[in-house]
Image (cartoon, helix red, strand yellow):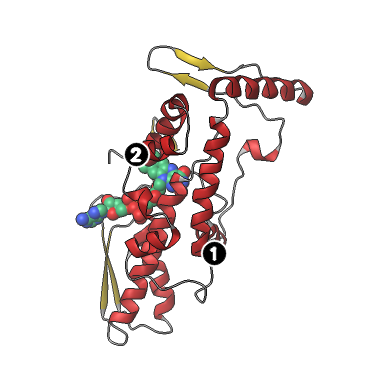
Amino acid sequence: MFRSAAPMFNMTIAIFSLLLVLILTVTATPQNTDSVCIIGSGIGGSSLAHFLRQYDASSLNVKTIRMFERNGVVGGRMRTVTIAGETVEAGATVLHPKNYHFLNFTKLHKLKIKNPSSSSSGDDFFSLGIWDGHKFLFKTLGFQSSLPFVQKIVNLANSVLIFARYGLSLFRMNSFVERTVGSFLNYYKSFEERPVFETVDEMLKWAGLYNLTRRTLHEELVDAALSPLLIHELATVRTLIWFDNRK
Ligand SMILES: Cc1cc2nc3c(=O)[nH]c(=O)nc-3n(C[C@H](O)[C@H](O)[C@H](O)COP(=O)(O)OP(=O)(O)OC[C@H]3O[C@@H](n4cnc5c(N)ncnc54)[C@H](O)[C@@H]3O)c2cc1C
């Protein structure tokens, strides 16, 4: 139900880190760079290689780009796995619409953007279930109808059920996400409006995001006055699935 800011945060950090590396590479060795080594072939490393090739034509003198990858495949945390003949996404799958860098990337490579079904029409079925490993702690109505009017009523009832469980914390969660995303948007300002960053820490501090990397999401959400139930059942679970912090 929530589109968390966390994946966008990760991906944006990856893209900004690579831009930082690119800037440092350009300023450190302007004329006679023979080869560049990139460690890791995730979206960060792969994008760096791609853009380095592009910039190379005009300003750099990179003859060789060497990419080191410890796994047998490229892609890092954006990857697919094939199970019983079915190929499924096992990493990043969702692009946040405010992740402009990544959206530009999809345009550059003429990738097709598929909108989530719930964004195309308010009549689409949505449901939510909280499973504790043994039983459902909470379930919305699972009734699905082909009649848009009926579906709207079911969806409305489900919204009421969710509100009854989580209350105003839902709105607080929303403003927390909006605030965090708002801080990110600072990075899209033009070069004239923002400094050139020497380090990632500096970059995070400038946008007011540094503290988010120094404490847990749980602490942050408690400060944002979210109820323990919402934090436990929605925010933490969602973040674990998306971030896979145990890696
Ligand atoms: C399950 C899951 C779901 C996600 N969903 C989303 C989503 O929907 N939307 C979104 O925006 N983001 C999502 N993310 C986050 C997103 O996938 C990552 O932020 C992004 O892929 C990170 O890219 P990266 O290049 O920085 O790092 P990685 O993808 O982690 O790439 C790093 C690469 O470096 C390699 N490497 C590391 N150390 C070495 C070494 N010493 N030598 C050689 N190679 C090395 C690793 O093997 C890896 O291939 C998700 C992540 C996970 C795990």
In this orientation, does residue 111 appear? yes
Question: Going 42% across and 63% down the picture, which residue do you hit?
Answer: 206
Q: Is residue 9 above or below residue 243?
A: below
Which one is nearer the viewer's eye here, 61 or 179?
A: 179
Q: Is residue 74 visible?
A: no
**Is 125 above or below relative to 80?**
above
Relative side of 128 to 159, left or right: left
Percent from the top left, x then y, of residue 184? 49, 56
Mark 1 residue crowding within 10 angstroms, few (<14) / some (14–19) / many (20+): few
Q: Position of residue 229 (x, y in %)?
A: 45, 24
Disc 1 residue type?
Answer: Leu
Image-quadrant location for residue 233: top left
Q: Secondary structure at mark 1?
A: helix
Front-most of 124 and 69?
124
Q: In the rendered view, does 162 fall on the left or right side of 22?
A: right
Q: Amino acid at mark 2?
A: Asp
Residue at x 39% of width, y 30% of height: 84
Q: Point out the image quarter for the C terminus.
A: top left
Query: On the rendered image, what quadrant is the N terminus found in?
Result: top right
Residue 108 disc label: 1
Residue where numbered disc 2 is placed? 244
